Amino acid sequence: MIDFCGIPLAHRIVNGSGTFDAIAARRAFGDAIVEQFPFAAFVSKTVTLEPRQGNPPPRLWELPGGLMNSIGLPNKGLAGYLQEDLPQLAELPVPLIVNVMGSAREDVARLVAAFAEREEVSALELNVSCPNVKTGLIMGADPRELAALLDHVRPHAGDKPLIVKLTPNCASPAEVAAAAEQHGADALSLINTLRGMAMHPDRPGEPWLGGGTGGVSGPAVRAIALSQVREVRARTELPIVGMGGVQSGRHAVDLHRAGADLCAVGTESFRDPLAAARIADEASMLDEAFPANAARGTEVVRL
Ligand SMILES: Cc1cc2nc3c(=O)[nH]c(=O)nc-3n(C[C@H](O)[C@H](O)[C@H](O)COP(=O)(O)O)c2cc1C
């Protein structure tokens, strides 16, 4: 067993928020996907206080080395999530980490407080890639802005571990990480997607994506993830969930050796919903820090 902020995990591979819909996967593939769940913990898609429709289409642009999305965080909002999603996610055989985001400190505090009192929730992840409506600053791009957010939010988290998901779209993720550590974060996760854009092929000067810009993920960002994880590891003692372009056990082991305690699989799960199980097995063959994926039993189920 791996210990992550006091949470026992069967292995080191989890999912990146928003890249694996466990409820839809169960509907599509049946209970097999739950019984042999590929991740050691499940990280929810970002939940906001109010429901969100997300961005207008088109929402995806395929890149030679990955994917760019402007999904825009559609979700049912806190009340809908508590009523409809949480009971279903509580049936998963692994700990649940809920990812939350708000555009005001008070909103984030309300979300954190609501999930802190739920025993189904093992930890909280703060998505800080969004602007503060009052200051205009991206919450996770500026060390002082993040410090103020954590000062406001930490008291509402009770004894739940608080993971801060860093954005790579800032001058120094390591400076932000240091501020997170000093202001009560229990762990860090990185990297979130990198801002990019694609031009519309038929409308000169217009963006392709409905949201204008999008977030780049997948193999294209792997080298950036490695360098940022290493840089952040040099600045903090906090446990790190490393992610960005992981497609194989080799990539997970590389991130671990750069300083990550856990590795998340994101974009790769769109190509193969069981990629994480393969990656966990491959990593366990390459590095003894990756124990065999005992939680899944013997064989990788084929869908
Ligand atoms: C389609 C898509 C949706 C995502 N949704 C979220 C989200 O809701 N919240 C969040 O914090 N990160 C979100 N992410 C970012 C991923 O969790 C991850 O940080 C990023 O994609 C890098 O990992 P990868 O290269 O393995 O995909 C999303 C990424 C993708 C591709």
Image (tube, helix red, strand yellow):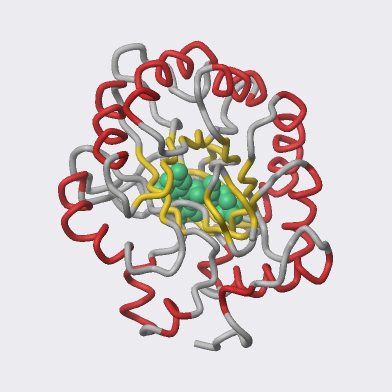
Q: Is residue 147 above or below residue 276?
A: above
Give the residue drawn at x 29%, y 19%.
133
| Residue 249 rendering spot, x and y as whole percentages | 74, 65
| Residue 210 rendering spot, x and y as whole percentages | 34, 46
Q: Quadrant of residue 109?
A: top left
Give the residue drawn at x 59%, y 33%.
168
What is the total number of numbered labels drawn onto the structure image? 0
Q: Depth check: 61 or 287 in front?
A: 287
Q: Depth check: 53 or 92 in front?
A: 92
Quarter of the image where the N terminus is located = bottom right
Q: Depth check: 125 or 118 in front?
A: 118
| Residue 162 rendering spot, x and y as whole percentages | 46, 35
Whether residue 61 is visible:
yes
Q: Depth check: 13 or 226 in front?
A: 13
Give the residue drawn at x 56%, y 58%.
14
| Residue 57 rendering spot, x and y as whole percentages | 32, 53
Q: Is residue 21 left or right of residue 114?
A: right
Give the residue drawn at x 46%, y 51%.
17
